[in-house]
Amino acid sequence: MGQVPTKARAVIIGGGVIGCSLAYHLAKLGWKDVVLLERKQLTSGTTWHAAGLIAQLRATANMTKLAKYSQELYGNLEAETGVATGFKRCGSITVALTEERREEIYRQAAMARAFGVDVEEISPAEVKAKYEHLNIDGVTGGVWLPLDGQGDPANIALALAKGARQMGAQVFEQTKAMGVTREGRRITSVQWENQNGESGTIDCENVINCGGMWGHEVGRMLSINVPLQACEHFYIVSEAIEGLSQMPVLRVPDECAYYKEDAGKMLLGAFEPVSKPWAMEGIPVDFEFDQLPEDFDHFEPILEKAVSRLPMLGSAGIHTFFNGPESFTPDDAYHLGLAPEMDNVWVAAGFNSVGIQSAGGAGQALAQWMEDGQKPFDLGDVDIGRMQPFQGNKHYLFERSKETLGLLYADHFPYLQKKTARGVRRTPFHHHLKENGAVFGELAGWERANWFANPGQDASYAYSWKRQNFFDNVAAEHKAVRNNLGLYDMSSFGKIRVEGPDACAFMNYIGGGQYDVPSGKIVYTQFLNDRAGIEADVTVTRLSETCYLVVTPAATRLADQTWMMRHKGAFNVVITDVTAGEAVLAVMGPNARKLLERVSPNDFSNAHNPFGTSQEIELGMGLARVHRVTYVGE
């Protein structure tokens, strides 16, 4: 193992499959001084007990791209490192038991095909031909991916670790990161201690949190927010079944189940609708290759359906009942990238039970991001910058994670809203909207009126892949705004004040627009990076000689403010989030001016209130600002 160095370009905390993948990919890019610290043994957190399914069918284009890379990487890893990864391209089948699920998996297949994934939509009879043991009662269709596979999760991680070592990275087991030294927005060193009682310090340029289910805890040590929660994940392994040969991986999401043949036995795993969060008081200090207590009652409903779906399980005994923890994030997407709170702390954690199939692509993408100082392609789906500070709250994570595990296998309808941990952020108009029949969606924790139910109409979503139940309601809103008047709550939009003597100079430095304008002028613009790429799309109002208001989308407020903070340099400015301090009502439509004239004594004529300007007005007994700006045509 050698001596732990006193200096490194990158210190990776955590030796699961993700940490090993990152070490491998950084070393491949020529980073020689990479150090990986693992508190116990490699893979001893959640990697070792993963099912090892390697699939390419993901919900978005970029996630499909990353999963496809993982599958290609694992196919070549054994030859490169000499470590048997158990990787087999046995193919995979996902079957639908409803018309809605068939629509979903066929749509996913069409998208995956566009990104070069070998995929085929198949009929129930073709499903039976490829998976003879399956009871196809109720099966409406399936999707077949011949290059999908399965592997040995621990050995995939060990192969990546060996490959990393061969290229010069150093991996230290039984060596725990105990603390760090922080200077401003940077971690300058990591303190470690090993099982022999030895300790030391590594001065470092970058620290990467690959702590898996410890990611939240490690994040706190590194002064960053990593919202994830461990949940119990169950599977059983049957006794050996006579004559059972290699089968494709099988997923039956409508029954919350997946099946994998392994050495003549059958593994059945579950993503049940209401899961069990684990270790709310903290993960036990000595946790290593540990199992959690059995809970057969919790698993039994899944098993009952499985025995009907795969009758061979009815006569096979249960060899192993396994319960182990997996970490889940608030939105079921993993965390990757540069942490908003710090300038040299990175994250790759929270893989929501798809860590094996994601690890290759995630490690490659993050390594390239670290090498270039910018994302290799759009990683907005998984960028840790999308998470809000409140989402690190343990009670919030406990409530939300009960749902997110099950959502892996739920129908992923358009506009699907989470049910748990709701109502965290409400605007001042919330109760007015609710009284008028608002049906709320959630974004970045904000409750937002997505549509309004008519009197007597059920004020909730009826999900579908076709026109949903709000279609006519939204059409009426469109007509009202086009022909008459619409009023909507935009208070959730991010509002960032930039104040100080250098406010104008700073805005001209960070943005593509010209900000040396009279007070009250609105400048619509982008923040650009040094490669002329767009980092943010914002509306900026000059409030005074020394103050600007930057308005950003609700979901990107933290990321946009972080971008500003990172480029503040020596400019004498203060950057403050004032989102919750100001309510915003958009008044839109040909009669917008008429409404304002009825509620305010101010002059709203074109001469006094031209496009692209802001004025203070009286409203009721208070004061407000009107910003005349829209991008929908005049």
Image (cartoon, rainbow, N blue to C red):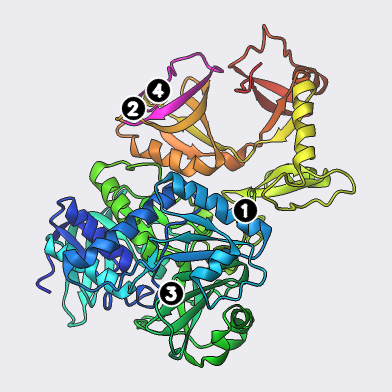
Circle on res. 103: 1
Residue 484 in view of the camera: yes
Question: Foreground: 37 or 595?
Answer: 37
Residue linked to disc 4: 512
Question: Foreground: 561 or 473?
Answer: 473
Which type of secondary structure does the marked residue at label 3 adopt?
Answer: loop
Residue linked to disc 2: 532
Magenta residue span: 508-529
Percent of width and height locating residue 314: 58, 88
Q: Which of marks 2 and 1 is nearer the N terminus?
A: 1
Say which residue appears at 43% left-offset and 59% top-offset: 226
Q: Earlier in the sequence, mark 4 or mark 3?
A: 3
Q: Distance between the residues labelled 2 and 4?
A: 10 Å
Question: Mark 2 or 1, which is nearer the eye?
Answer: 1
Q: Which of marks 4 and 1 is nearer the N terminus?
A: 1
Question: Is label 2 in contact with label 4 (beta carbons under 8 Å)?
Answer: no
Task: Name above or below for residue 521 compared with residue 498.
Answer: above
